[in-house]
Structure formats: C-alpha cells, structure tokens
Image (spheres, rainbow, N blue to C red):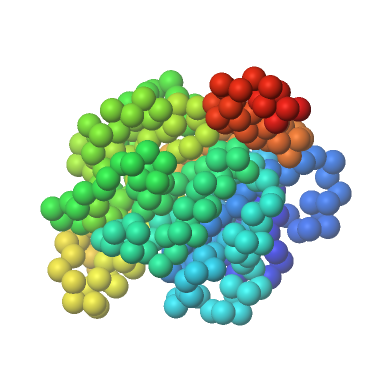
Amino acid sequence: MPIKVPDELPARRILNRENVFIMNESRASSQDIRPLRIAVFNLMPNKIETETQLLRFLGNTPLQVELELLQPATYKSKNTSEEHLLKFYKTFEDVKDEKFDGLIITGAPVEKMLFEDVDYWEELCAVMEWSKTNVFSVLHICWAAQAALYYHYGVQKYEAEEKIFGIFEHTAADKNHYLLYGFDDVFNAPHSRYTGISEDEIRKIPELSILSTSEKAGIYIVGSRNERQFFITGHPEYERNTLKNEYERDKRAGLNTAIPKNYFPNDDATLEPICRWRSNSDLLFSNWLNYFVYQETPYDYVKEISKEISKEISKEISKNVKNDNLTEKRVLK
C-alpha cells in the first residue's frame, strides 16, 4: 500500500528497507483519490516500535492511507523521547472535531490494574465515545479490546492463572466472516497478557459475535454485529523478536515469567524465534482495511457521518419528547 507518513518518522527507514511502499507527501497529493484517514491511539510504552509494527501491516494493500498518530495527553511517556512525541504525535483534543475512516487503539501494560485506576482512563473513555460518531471502524488490540468491551458493553476481565504468553493456535468461529477471509482452518497468533474475558459473558450480549477462539488462549477476536468495532485480545502486530524482548525484560525485572509457548525452537531461548503468524496478520489488517473501512466508508465521509449523527440525535429527541408532539416537531425542525 502507498502509505503516507512524515519523511522523518523513524519507522520510514525500516519499512523502506523491507520494501514496504511508503509515499512522500508530494506524490500523495498528486494522486486524484481520497486516502483513507487512519488514526492510531498509541498506548504502548515503546511507541516507535509499535508505530513500525502497525505501519508494516497497514502498508501491505493497494489502498492509500494517511496516518495520524495520537498519544494520551493525561500521561507522560517514559520510554519515548519528548522530541519524537512533539514532532509526530497529536492528542485527542487536537483531532476531536475531525472524522476518520478507521481507528486503531493499541494495547498497554496496565492490565492488572482496575480500568478506572489507569491514569488516562477518562481520556480513553472520551476517545471510545467519540469513535462511535467520528470513526467508521475501530480496531482494539489486547488491553484496549478488554477496555472497550468493558466500556461499551460492561464485560469484566478476569486474571489468568498464569501469563498467557506465546504463540497459540486459533480457529475461526465464523469462517465466512470477511475479517477472516483467506485464513487457514488453523492459524497462529501471539498473545502476551495476564487477563482474559469470559466466552459465556460475550455470548450473552446480542450485539457481539465471537469470530475466533483458541483452546489454550481463549477468545481471540470479537466483532460487533454492525461491524463497526473489532476487539482482538492478542497481538497480531508483533514482529519476530517482540515476545523475546518481553521475556528478557521480565527476566531482568526478576519476574518468574515462563518461556513463551510455541515460540523458540525446542524452547531454547538462545535460538532465534520462529515466526508463525506473519501471513495471517497481514490478512487480518488488509481485510479490515478493505472490507470494513474502504468498502464501507462513503467517499464524502464527513457528509455521510453527519447524516448518521443527525439520525441518532433525532432518535434521542423522539424518545425524550414523544409525549409532546408539538414540541417534538418544533425541536426536529
């Protein structure tokens, strides 16, 4: 995909070496098409690493994408330089009056905390509420998936007996769903989390559909039935050495973290990990962009989404004043 990113973004050099098609601003402006506007609300500690991982997948379809990087205003990152954040990132306050075709909310290493105790919880809630009217499709990853399911549907998380850590086999609960189009019957995905969500609780919510599960790792993908929200409990964006780096970090911190499952050859952490998930991760992101963003978003998105917002407002007004027809007509007019 010709993906438009700032010329000086560190990810650009890495992706150029990998032959990911990165487009400069002058070339992008000369194309007579409307690029897809994708925002990334990046909650991960190492923001440069996460940017690169996501851009690698967003840059693998024929669609032109214009990226907007967002960070919380209510939390100061300790692992990314202030210079990088000031140069390449905006906050929600900067974009709250804008419309986006798609939004990705990343995971964050805060899953053992109560949602309400997270420093930027209120800001994240504002972003998730805003996404219902200003974004056409939202992809929530790992902790963000749990946070969004809790915020939108009241789904509680539970703490696992041990860290769900490694590469796990998954199957599609709905093989005909476009998000999983082209997937093998059994496919792999990385997980790195201490908490999970209950399949029974999800099944009780009529607005949600389970799309993929794992016998060992539990629910992997949940989608809203209107196909505007997707919740992914794993990390499809991870690259070959990400779990290795996390494992070594935990060891240095003195944590008793078990070796990632199905990751190192013969469970030998001195050997290079085997990447078993790259192809289906490519499919996951390209299917989302194609079927749920590009194919569904109106060309004049601002105009169309305004119509949808007006409809929702009208519904609320009708509910509130249904017993007073004169007032209702006056307000709707």
Q: Quadrant of the N terminus?
A: top right
202 relative to 315 in the view: left or right: left
Q: Is residue 113 above or below residue 79?
A: above
Compare residues 227 and 257 and report the one nearer the observer: 227
Q: Is residue 242 above or below residue 306?
A: below
Which residue is more in the foreground, 64 or 204? 204
Name the residue rendered at 56%, 45% in the picture. 131
Number of callouts in the render? 0
Q: Is residue 147 above or below residue 209?
A: below
The answer to whether residue 11 shows anywhere in this view is yes
Q: What quarter of the picture does the C terminus occupy?
A: top right
Residue 312 placement (x, y as % from top left): 60, 31
Residue plotted at (22% across, 32% down): 200
Please provide percent x and percent y for residue 95. Answer: 66, 57
Residue at x 15% of width, y 55% of height: 162
Residue 249 coordinates in the image, percent (x, y): 29, 73
Q: Is residue 295 visible?
A: no
